[in-house]
Image (cartoon, rainbow, N blue to C red):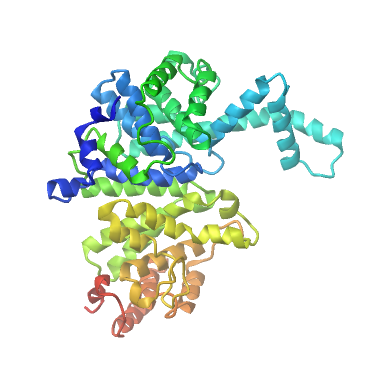
Amino acid sequence: MHEASEPARGKQYLNGLTSAQATGVVVITFSEIISALSFAIDLTEDAAPGHALRSCLLGMRIARALGMTAKELESLYYALLLKDVGCSSNGSRLGHKVRRDEHRENEAATDPRKPRARETQRAFKLIQGEMHAEAPLRQRFRRLLHMEPRQRSSDQEMILLRCERGAKITRKLGLSAATCDTVFALDERWDGAGGPLRRQGQAIPLLARIVTLAEHLDAFACECTPAVAMDRMLEQSGRWFDPELVQVAFALDHAGQLWTHCLPADDLDLCRQLVIGLDPEASHGVDADEIDRICEAFADVVDAKSPFTYQHSLGVAQIAVSMGTTLALPPDRLRVVQRAALLHDLGKLAVPNTILDKSGRLSVEEWHAVIEHPRLTQQILSRIEPFAELAAIAGAHHEKLDGSGYPNGLREDQLGIESRVIAVADTYRAMTEGRPYRPGVSHAVAVGKLRELTPHQLDARCVEALDLCCNPARGTPAPALEHLAQLRKRPASVPAGGNWQAFSA
């Protein structure tokens, strides 16, 4: 496919126009949101930024060369952008990076110069990781004989978990059954050795076969070169990949029509604009309820990363909205609070589980990885132009009124009421949830600790609002109400955009 044949909408985006600028009406499309949030999905797989976008361009070009219908192209388009949406769950990160490693292991295993290299490598890892270093060698290998079948079973369980979660989230987004089936079948292999159902050949959905080929083309191109990527696809044709699709990719590559604007060094903003331009429903904006559903779905992605954060984002959002209601925030600001709270931890997808679930003290390097997550959250959300304010609020959930927070050390006069509400809700939720290094505490203990942080770090009004709406002893809220009423009478330094006037009533 020549660049000139890309849809006209792609040309519009190449000229630097957004949908809002082009029409004069602020309309945000599903693809504008998902294409930006795909950067968060890339974080779960430690992929090169823009992996999902480049995979989308590659896959759509292969599909168009096959002459697929508009309906098929629409289902494929969203499957390409959301293919790794199930990868965040702990222990199930088996996306393109792991599959790429398996390619290398397969090559080593079939190389006559390296007999049984794959088995040797796996045995070494198992012995090193799960056996005590001082155990007798005979005991270690006896244990290994029992561990190998268990390891294979565990791998299949993790693949199934990943695929089921991915399909569930795409269904939650209201996407087609074909898109959901494609995401579910992403780990199947042409020769039947994949998962989760070990389907083979034509029994694997065509869209899934295209997605698998496209994502591996980009993965190998980023790690090596496009030429190496094409060689790898040819080597695995008939094993991992559909031979017919490999031939289509080779034909496009030979004609110079495959890699345009989706090489590793190409501009990511331009790549995203082209992807948005391929949106089958680019003229249809999403409504407020659809945006809420997207926020909830990606909160699920974040919360699935660790068993210790299960429903954390949803819980923070519920608490924050209750606090905002108690503080008499207007409905439009409550919606901003809800969305920012749902998405506040997007950047944590970049933090390894070995750090998040660590029971001991974090090293300096590990702590630096943690404190970068709010900045990543803001960067990802800032790619969605109408989300600029939401991005700033979500990115400030670890800032403190005295400037001691992170990542930017913002102070009281830089933090609006929405950021203050989410900061308190997030801290409270984290305190009351269990963590690898400590159990969760009671409401009373948590509120006591929060009050110790006021007024220097946390907003006292927000803490009292939280106590009022979350206190399990709801039958006697009078002390909290009285305390909140007194706090409302105090002068406060708050940015004009913080809607603090709502507290003066």
Residue 427: x and y in percent read 46, 66
Q: Is residue 299 left or right of residue 332?
A: right
Q: Residue at x 32, y 55 (%)?
A: 339
Q: Which quadrant is the C terminus positioned in?
A: bottom left
Asked if residue 247 is positioned above or below residue 412 in the image, the reply reads: above
Q: Is residue 449 left or right of residue 324?
A: right
Q: In the depicted view, which residue is nearer to us: 124 or 469?
A: 124
Q: Is residue 297 visible?
A: no
In the rendered image, the residue lying farthest to the left is 24
Residue 170: x and y in percent read 36, 36
Residue 31: x and y in percent read 28, 40
Q: Residue at x 80, y 32 (%)?
A: 141
Q: Is residue 386 visible?
A: yes
Asked if residue 408 is positioned above or below residue 489 in the image, the reply reads: above
Q: Which quadrant is the N terminus positioned in?
A: top left
Residue 304: x and y in percent read 47, 46
Q: Residue at x 43, y 55 (%)?
A: 376
Q: Is residue 42 left or right of residue 308?
A: left
Q: Residue at x 21, y 35 (%)?
A: 281
- Image quadrant assignment for residue 122: top right
Asked if residue 41 is positioned above or below residue 475 in the image, the reply reads: above
Tally the marks. Answer: 0
